[in-house]
Amino acid sequence: MKDKRLRIVFMGTPGFAVESLRALIEGGYQVVGVVTTPDKPVGKHHSVLQACAVKEYALSQHLPVLQPEKLKDTLFLKQLKAWNADLQIVVAFRMLPEVVWNMPPLGTFNLHASLLPQYRGAAPINWAIINGEKETGVTTFFLTHEIDTGKVIYRERVPIEDTDTFEIVHDRLMHLGARLVVKTVDAIAVDAIQAVEQEQLTGNGQELKPAPKIFKETCRIDWNKNVKEIYDFIRGLSPIPTAWTELNTGKDEILNLKIFECEKIIKQHELPAGTIVTDGKKYLDVSAKDGFIRLKNIRQAGKKRMAVEEFLKGSMNVKAL
């Protein structure tokens, strides 16, 4: 029987976290407060403050919200303690200091978008696709001192299809993760948890792959790799933060292109890596080690996202760098 009397504090920021918070609210659980990031200045002059997705949803549900700049701030800790939570739940938030995660009597658990201990870090979904994994999943685990290393409560697996992009897998895990959060709360409420050390979940000699934060330079395409590697790289970054490359128009102009969609063509050739093959109308292929990447949907810097056919109307004699 579900015990929904637990006092829960929820911590998160992006849309991925909203789905878990919504599952708790709509399920009738007692969320006594939400902790999220401060509003961010946006606009041309950074004069407008924009709330994150979690804050917007929390306010729509009339939940109290805290937005600390520093998680060790004395006033914040006092306010957090005043909520008298039994349990804290973290989904896509900042790294917590011990004084925060160790506060509630039932502890703090996190939802992570990978099958821990694989892909610890800030970008687990991106890296799983980039590395060509055939499956991924979500994990709930108790927080401890080292990031993403605490005892695992539950894991759920899902396949990664060859055509899946970051966006598709993100949304799939977002919904699966919300259900796993509820399942975890229910088990904690009735003391039915048998959490296991992550080391017990690794096979002998299994390589642990990290998921570090992704920066702009991380997203640059290396055309010297094989077609499958480049194809996985592009879909693992689509639509955000987006793989990119530079093209030479042959007119002393360098175009910066973001690539959202592509196809892989395995074919023997003797062209240097990064060579453009195009009819100037319908297709634009870029050579890799063992074939070509056919660009399908792109965006030139300063312009809108478009199909490659539209791009080719105004860009002749392009060559990859």
Image: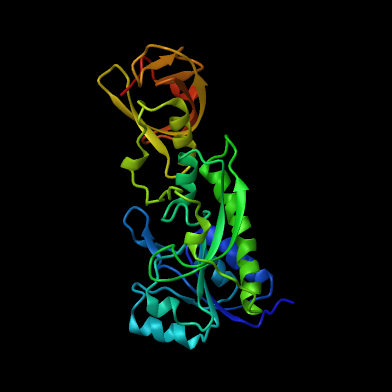
Instruction: Give the x, y percent position of residue 297.
Output: 50, 30
* Side of 88 where 47 appears, left or right: left
Instruction: Give the x, y percent position of residue 307.
Output: 51, 27
Up the image or down, 79 lies above or below 10; here it is below
Nearest the viewer among 91 and 200 is 200
Q: Quadrant of residue 222?
A: top left
Q: Which residue, as the protein is rendered here, is positioned at the far right?
A: 1
Nearest the viewer among 172 and 255 is 172
Up the image or down, 73 lies above or below 51; here it is below
Nearest the viewer among 279 and 6 is 6
The residue positioned 43% from the left and 56% from the top of the image is: 120
Observer able to see residue 35: yes
Up the image or down, 172 lies above or below 161; here it is below
Instruction: Give the x, y percent position of residue 210.
Output: 40, 50
Q: Quadrant of residue 73?
A: bottom left
Observer able to see residue 313: no
The residue positioned 56% from the left and 76% from the top of the image is: 63
